[in-house]
Amino acid sequence: MIDNFDWLQPNDYGKPVIPEKEPPLVVLALDTLNKAEDKVLRDWIEKVFPNILDYFSLKPAKGMSLEAAEKLAVNVKPDKKDKILTKLVEHKDQSLAIHLLNAAVGGWTLVKLANLDELEQRLYLAAVTLHDLNKIVLTQLGNVRMDGKEWDKYHHYFDVWAETLGLWKFISSEYWQDIAFLAQNAEDARGANLTLANFQEIKLAPEHLMDLAEFVRFADLLASMAHRPDSLYQENIRAIVRRRLKDKYVIRHHRTIENRGLLTQTIHNAVLEKSREVGWIAFLFFPDGITYFVLKDSEKPDLSNLAEIVRSHILKTAAKGLNSLISRQPKGIISCKPDMKEVADVELAAETLIRQVFNILGEKRASVTGERREKIKLLPELVNLDWNYPANLQVDRLAEGVRGLVDILKEYYGVSEEKAIQALLNALDMNEYVEALQRIPALGGVPHGWYFLAGHYIGKNGSLNDAELENVMIKAIRQVITEWGKPEQLTPFAFLDAYIAQVLDISDSDKQHDFEKELNRYHRNKANRKREPICAVCNSAFDVREEFSSYTNKRVTSLSKESLRGICTVCQVEKLLRSYSLRRSLEADDDLVYLHLYPDYYFTPETALIMNRAYKSFAQNVFSDLDKELAKHSYNPKYIPRADVFRVGADSKENEKRRLEKVEYLEGQMHGYYLLGIPALFKKPTDTEVWHIPALLTLIAPLTFGVKVVASRSTLPPYDSGADFKETAVLDGIHTYWQHSIRKSSFRLDELTNAIPAAFAVYALTSQAYRSKNFPVWNALNNVSQSLDTSPLYVFHYADRILENIKKEERKKKANQLSDPAIIVAKKLLNYYQLLIDYYQEDNPMNMIQYLVDKYARFYRASGKNSSAYTRLRPLNIAAKVILESQPNTSEDDLQLMIEGYLFSLVDGVLNNNNEGYIPSEAVKDKNLRQAVIEEFAKYFVKEVFKNYCRSERSLLRQNINLIRHAAEAWYIKQYIKKPEEKAQKSENKESN
């Protein structure tokens, strides 16, 4: 029964967030949504959405971990429990905050097309906000209806949450029953409440509310089930569109069956532009396609030249980076990479190579002509040649440039090397040197003959400046091209026509996605694997070509029978696009981890603009940025949506100073996937240094941007869509330090509640304990993580290191610490420890240690705040020493008596001023109490510490005693080190004696 359910109020979600800052997403939204038609949506985002982020960013609306599911289904009937648990766990993650955003913006295009007035728009958004009140207020599965005995309860919680979420600032509370009616009728399957007798204070006519309820129902259907652009053809969705838009519009879509990244993005953008030309209205954006509202009689976009549009975009992009296709080997050989022939004609390739000669052989580079002349002219067969010519940088440039032009002619025209050389020497009027060029060998692969030729050219023509020398080479190659005519060039990326036809599906009917096409392709690739070359990057069989190893520059693949792996034409284009847009290749980088971001909400025309701004504003963070924002809140994740950890609000000029690697998407044309490379800010970084920031950002990004994240060295999207995996955050191939300390690499949304604080605790501990020149030594994450994997008590092991670092910093700044650093460190370590224990959810030995300290603090404490660790922990040390030095067959009772004897002696010595320390007043005045608390401590130490924790093994006590001491000292310092009554108490001790 519903009466058995607990009801949640705002305070149950934790301490309300202090609105120190607007959430970055809200700031960007308010800056972006400037159209008059979005005025009401803008008002909702400003007044309501920040509160939704505060309360519901970590509350699952769909999938969840098994632990969370078991709590939710605690009262479910046993015969249904397994089925319900499986359903909850198998659902894809989505936070309630993002679910509500999906509902609000998902239906916004329909609201605008239907021309709802301002009040109707406000009622729509208000109803969407509270349409899932059940999920907000119930801790267990259940349903609340606004009728019968639950009416008053529903009214109460409806009003409480409307006030908390700022709804009454957005719309007058006099419409509360109209909003309640709309919210209660947001679902077809269950929960509908059309009984008007339950809503006697509605302001709008019942028929009017019935119409408006369909907009809320449409929004809920979108938020609940739409994962792909072809998933919106359910009859209930289509029926609402027909009724609300007067049968004028239908839903259409385009979709690709795979997501390659930038190439897929280019195809989407081309189809989007063509669709707009015929009046299709972009509605929802997904990683694999776009859904549109289309006038019923609208024509289909003309995609006959789609491949040419995509080809043109690739060539335009490639033109920005042709220089990168020119490289020089140490031996003096400048040449084009194979991709050049695909993206540039012969004249452009030659001009690019000539320009790069001057960049590669810059003014500061020493000439090698003279040195190489001395090595080659001593050969007996060459002594009769004329070796008297200039040796300078211009000779180097001409030699290596003309040799490179020979390669271009060979590649583009398919001619022999002799013919290419003859043509160029003829253009340079250097035919007389053909024989000498052929006689001079390329010792060790060095083109000695070309330095000889270039030297004589400069000798004949005098000193040439850079412009003159460049003109010599350009004039020569153009003369050859004119004489030979431009070579017949194959269509660049000719595979695109067939590829796009294979992967693109554009709907002009209500057909679903053609899974048969995708399945056939899979089987074809699988069947071909033994006979055809397979792409080493994507494992497909698209026209695979030879490829060179990115590590050794040696040919490691071929198309022979012995080796059937290479790189396919599709990956080749993706690689080319990334080279110029991302400035990275498809190969994994030693200093880079990629964040693959899959928004957990739909991109709409509105949110696409907002998130485009967010990603463009992102700048590289360091740990201190993140720590500064979150440490003051003890790393509570609920503060992350308001923390500008992605520097969205930072000065753009300051952001530009930070290293940044990211894909540049065209504004307003994002499709639910984003690739972001996070470079390590170190020279020759270790794996730990490479991973330490991306790992943290992977946990934070879901709450900052509302995305799912996969962090990986892989450059290709691990998943086509965020709907393809359940988790919210996945760390693919992370360094082992993370496995030791955090112990898992994939996280459901609800698991981030404890995982984020635990990760920050590990990082903060490391950054404070290990420092060099006032910067954290992140390689120490390995040592710290391995220690914590042994025991969380190792947190306290680093107290002395942290204190020493604090003192060093004070000495540098010549500052006087206002607060006792020992107390500050103790509080921090206790906090870090608790965050880790909350995350590990394992036995907490700190409870035992706290009891232990609290028990001996009743009869003994150290004197003064500057007392040593020895004196602060003396009772504990005495008890441990007694046991460690006792005979193995000593009984527990005897151990207890022995410890008591030593402690009585200690206390008597303090009372007689023979030992340092002081005795609390109660124990001073009451000898029986003093005896009782000493006996209680001794008994507790023997039973809990020695017998239970150390299993009565002296070796285990010896192994663990230092950890116990460090933890006990932190607790003692926090609780007892600074007592103002200490001096007075010591005087009282003297008087009593």
Image: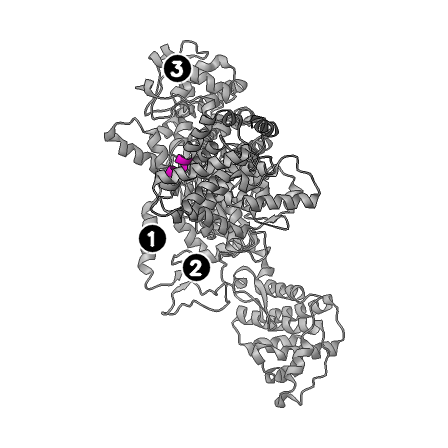
Separation (CA) of disc 3 from disc 1: 55 Å
Q: Is residue 886 left or right of residue 976?
A: left
* Residue 555 locus on image (x, y percent): 47, 69
* Residue 816 locus on image (x, y percent): 69, 38
- Which residue, given by chain and number where applicable, does mark 1 sit on? 522
At label 1, the amino acid type is: Tyr
Nearest the camera: 617 or 454?
617
Q: Secondary structure at mark 1?
A: helix
Nearest the camera: 963 or 703?
963
Magenta span: helix, strand or loop, mainly? Answer: helix
The image quadrant that residue 806 belongs to is top right
Lower sequence index among marks 1 and 2: 1
* Residue 979 locus on image (x, y percent): 58, 30
Query: What segment is highlighted magenta in the picture?
Result: 938-944
* Residue 188 locus on image (x, y percent): 34, 24
- Which residue, given by chain and number where applicable, does mark 2 sit on? 568
Q: Residue at x 60, y 55 (%)?
A: 320
**Can residue 552 be spotted in the picture?**
yes
Q: Is residue 383 above or below residue 470?
A: below
Lower sequence index among marks 3 and 1: 3
* Neighbourhood count class around disc 3 (C-alpha, 10 Å): few under 14, some 14–19, many 20 upward: some
Separation (CA) of disc 1 from disc 2: 16 Å
Q: Is residue 880 left or right of residue 630?
A: left
- Whether residue 763 is in magenta: the answer is no
Name the mark on residue 153: 3
At label 2, the amino acid type is: Cys
Q: Is residue 825 above or below residue 550?
A: above
Are the residues at dot 1 and dot 2 in contact (C-beta closer than 8 Å)? no
**Can residue 600 be spotted in the picture?**
no
Q: Is residue 945 left or right of residue 694?
A: left
